[in-house]
Amino acid sequence: MQQEFKASIDRALHNANLTGALGKFSEAYKVNRAKAYEGIDFEALRSRIAELKGYAASHLQELSDLFQKNAEAKGAKVFRTTDPAKVREYILKVAQDNGVKSIVKSKSMATEEIHLNPFLEKAGIEVNETDLGEWIIQLAGQTPSHMVMPAIHMTKEEVADLFSKEVDERLTSDIPRLVKVARGEMRPKFLKADMGISGGNIAVAETGSIALVTNEGNARLVTSLPKIHIAVVGIEKLVAKFSDIAPILKALPRSATAQLLTSYVSIISGPTPNSDGSMKELHIILMDNHRSEMAADPMFKEAMQCIRCASCLNVCPIFRLVGGHVFGKVYTGGIGTILTAWHDELKSSEDIQGLCIQCGACKDVCPGKIDIPGLIMEIRRRLVKEQGVPFVQKSIYAVVNNRRMFHGMLRAASLAAKPFAKGTKFIRHLPMFLADLTDGRSLPAIASKPFRDVFKTIHQPKGLQEKAVFYAGCLIDFAYPEMGEALVKILNKAGIEVLFPEGQTCCGAPARYNGAYEVAANNAVDNIKALLADRADYVISACPTCTVALDHEFVTTFESLGQRKWLPQARELAAKTIDFSTLVKKLVDEGRLTLKEGRQLGKITYHDSCHLKRTLHADQPPRELLQKAGYELAEMFECDICCGMGGSYSLKLPEISAPILQRKLKNIKDTGAPVVAMDCPGCVMQIRGGMDQDGAGVKVHHTVELLADQLED
Amino acid sequence: MYEQFKTRAEGVSAEVHRFATGAEALDFLVDFVRTEGVADQPGQYAVFADCPFLGVVDRQRLETVAGLCFEVTRERASAAKIGISQVDWALADTGTLVQDATAIDKRLVSTLPIIHVALIETGGLRADMPALLADLRPEQANYIAMITGPSRTADIERVLTIGVHGPERLVIVFIDRMGGTN
């Protein structure tokens, strides 16, 4: 990672105003968004949006032609170009031809994308941003840190300082007063402007209309007062039908700012009269700038379904820590990473793609139904393909790819770690350059005897009819063999014999999440061979990340690489794969397992692991099992927000992972529960390590450990 | 639908009134502009955009109010405290007003003054956006304006603040029978 990038993360993390404002906002957003969507079938709504935007993305040429024809028939001038430079030149020419001296602008990300303002200013034209947030950052000489709330990173004191300089009067940080000052300052600029520039939230091909969605009323003034109006619209805003406006207007304000509708929506379908009786000159620029290339890409076409609500930023545990500026100058957050890779070039996303922890929170709320984390993974894959895996990582994967060497090294590490573990089950400090890894978190000591060795010593009852293959995954195998023992004990009680094929190896997730798909594919082949060799009824895993690998990702990894050979076996394995809690819940429901009656085990809180909740949708079975066992569930605040582990993420960006963990620890402690349960050994590693350093004494357990003693024989 | 509209609109800080007839609405308007201190001086003007309402009520009662004028210019609207216009539809599920605002004076009176008073026939109520879009004719209306509450921003520290570039008050007046008398 670039030094400069690491430094920008560091600056953001140490900006208390920023993390405070974003943290508060993200908490409020979650509640308000849910309220705004009350009574609405979000899945149906976003399916409709994905469908209509997806249709538009595959008919861009046709819809652009139709839009142009219809808008021109109404008297608008339509200019279409792929090139940002031509957009700038076109606007300058219109301005110069009409003697334009000053311009008022309403918020437009498309003009941010092409850096329009400095270009026009260089030509001697005054450009005034009129959206309050945009004006603030214009005065500060900054770029937007959020698509919807460009100045969310600034405090009222900073705004007061900026405005004070502008109006030459010492202003206090009273927000209503500052807003009044902005109104007073902008009003004469609106009245004298010769040209208004806006973006466009929707462009309707059927009628040649553009829709503008705002709250402040500035877009109404920008499109009403000056005699020339230029709308700069990215072609991803095209939709076919006028009626397509409705679902977008239903989702956009709810997802963006948790409003049922913004204060103002303007639908412009041709020039309108000016106040002196003349007709307005209306120009609409349909800008491509790599959008049609994106639409032509079978995977990234989905990103064209974006309605620019920025909800992916609002729910992102990383964004709320670092803010937008770390992501770059224009589009920020999850979707911003994807757009930057396309509008700029793949290479520009090299650093920022690494910010994604793959927790999937954004995918859950995206009204365009875009698999944002999936597309970021695809960026990683392509980056690795283009540039190769960075050297250090490569040597790690070379090891992971060789099971014997990998497992040999883990065994050796058990011995090597001894001096650091000091007889406890934790490594609390690592020397020198590895010190960051134990900053705020102790690492588990590598078990002296891995599960693969322990397994041989377990005596299972004879004659069990059903068989389940246990896929342990690296963490249970080498750090937490006791979780594996508990699992065997439980399944045996249900009359299931557990098999442990020795040939199983790393699930490939670490390689895949770093874009090294070929390594992940080799891991997949080794595991398929090992896990399908025994004819078992189930393949069970107690690690959601491994379960997702077996259940989904072996198939998609092969597909991404165009490897067909192992696809049928990968599908067979996927069909047999089940996560621990879902299987146990099923066995309890079927009466094959019975939880002890009448136990009062006290208060417990539950942490949702990202893959378990958002990919496997299995957040309820562990809760039901624990409660049935006799625990009293006390839900923590933000129970389904990532713990900051993210596999190797916590190794690559420990400075981001650590504060996410601290927040999680606080939320756990606030429940007052003495025990926290979760279904992922990775989360156990992160949270148990955090609790150890925190010293709070909250016990951290995998559900499997808690249930093992609560079952009737 | 009206009750739902009222709840939604008040939820976004609009003020909602309802009268049986145009004449009653006129009484309210005359009273309202007087209470707000409309006078023939900058900052205290009222501007009224031409609309069907003016054709069915006793317009003279408005003409006697000093500072209220029907000639809408940018300068006059910008120096006005109150802008009055008639809108065409209302959406019950979001508390939204919808207007064919192609005529510039309709936009001047609803964007520049401090208070926007919107008159609407109760029959213009629609359930929601899809119901409205089915009725709208964008080929005939070049500027369709939707208004939901007063102008607002939360751009400074996410604190909701009313009245940025547009009106800080939105007063909605429903009229059941526009031409009806008492």
Image (cartoon, helix red, strand yellow):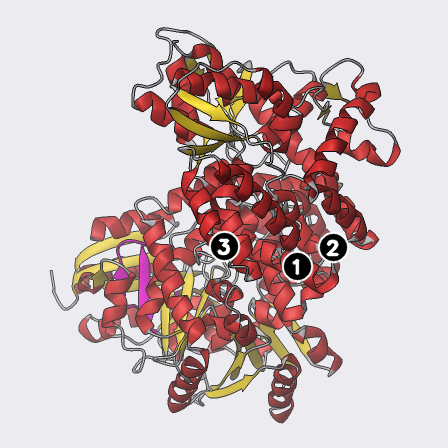
Chain ID at mark 2: A
Crowding near pointer 1: few (<14 within 10 Å), some, many (20+)? many
Q: Nearer the viewer, residue A62 or B82?
A: A62
Chain ID at mark 1: A
Crowding near pointer 3: few (<14 within 10 Å), some, many (20+)? some
Magenta segment: B83-100
Q: Residue at x 57, y 50 (%)?
A: A313
Q: Nearer the viewer, residue A266 or A218?
A: A266
Above-or-below relation of A482 to B79 = above
The disc placed on residue A136 is 1
Kindly identify which residue carries mark 3. A371
Q: Earlier in the sequence, mark 1 or mark 3?
A: 1
Q: Is residue A48 visible?
A: yes
3D distance between C-alphas at marks 1 and 2: 41 Å
In this image, A222 relative to A248: left or right?
A: right
Kindly identify which residue carries mark 2. A389
Q: Secondary structure at mark 1?
A: helix
Percent across and percent down for residue A260 are 38, 52
Instruction: Choose mark 1 or mark 3, whichever is in front.
Output: 3
- Badge 2 vs badge 3, beta-carbon distance below 8 Å: no
Does mark 3 fall on the same chain as mark 1?
A: yes
Q: Nearer the viewer, residue B10 or A448?
A: A448
Q: Residue at x 31, y 66 (%)?
A: B98
| Quarter where residue A400 is shown | top right
Q: Secondary structure at mark 2?
A: loop
In this image, A703 relative to A268: left or right?
A: right
Q: Earlier in the sequence, mark 2 or mark 3?
A: 3
Percent across and percent down for residue B103 are 36, 80
Q: Residue at x 43, y 33 (%)?
A: A536
Q: How many numbered marks does the figure carry?
A: 3
- Is residue A645 located in the magenta-colored stretch of the structure? no
Q: Is residue B65 visible?
A: no
